[in-house]
Image: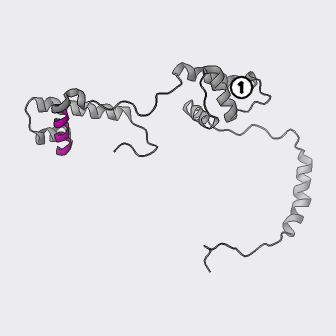
Amino acid sequence: MGNPKGVRRDSEALQKLEERRFLAAQLLGQGVPQAEVARRVRASRQSVSRWAQHLEQGGRRALRKAGRAGRKPRLSATDLRRIERGLKRGPEALGYETSLWTSWRVAHLIETECGVHYHPSQAWRILQQLGWSCQRPVGGALERDEAKVRQWKRKRWPEIKKNAKNRAAPSSSSTKAD
């Protein structure tokens, strides 16, 4: 059955379930009836019956938990630390003119530091794994003239607002109620 889409496996929970199956195997080996085993390990009788079949066919090894799901990560813990140090140095260290990290730049950093190619759309997953988040740049545009902005808001915007055309234009939506 597995986990719902997007839900990761909880390794601690899987470990506890494996321990419960091993306890059931031990009790079954001592000749305890399946119904009693189910009660003691707090499992359904159907589960204990299935465990007994697995135990009979493949021994205790058949009751072990499943291995990890999916591919193994291509970046080690050392690689992740190296990427984090590169992120802290800033994109200028890679030769970029601005101090903004983009997905393309992060992918370039990963390839430069670790030799592993990631598509820019996947580079953000690495940032999230490292605890980094999307941020807006500090400050505004260098070309911004606050006096002109105030003047525009005070004079031009009211004119535009007063002369707005088609304020209540009819909708062409077929889903709009009549």
Percent position of residue 63, x then y: 24, 31
Number of numbered discs: 1
Residue located beneath label 1 in the image:
90
Percent position of residue 120, x then y: 64, 35
Which image quarter: residue 70? top left
Callout 1 secondary element = loop
Q: Farthest bottom residue? A: 178
Q: Amino acid at mark 1?
A: Gly
Q: Label the magenta part by its dominant secondary structure.
A: helix
Percent position of residue 54, x then y: 20, 34
Q: Is residue 172 above or below residue 63?
A: below
Which image quarter: residue 87? top right
Q: Residue at x 90, y 55 (%)?
A: 152
- Magenta region: 45-55
Counting other residues with Cα less than 10 Å from the Cα at mark 1, is it few (<14), some (14-19), or many (20 or more)? some
Q: Nearer the viewer, residue 69 or 80?
A: 69
Q: Nearer the viewer, residue 129 or 118?
A: 118
- Residue 71 in the figure: left or right of residue 63: right
Which image quarter: residue 37? top left
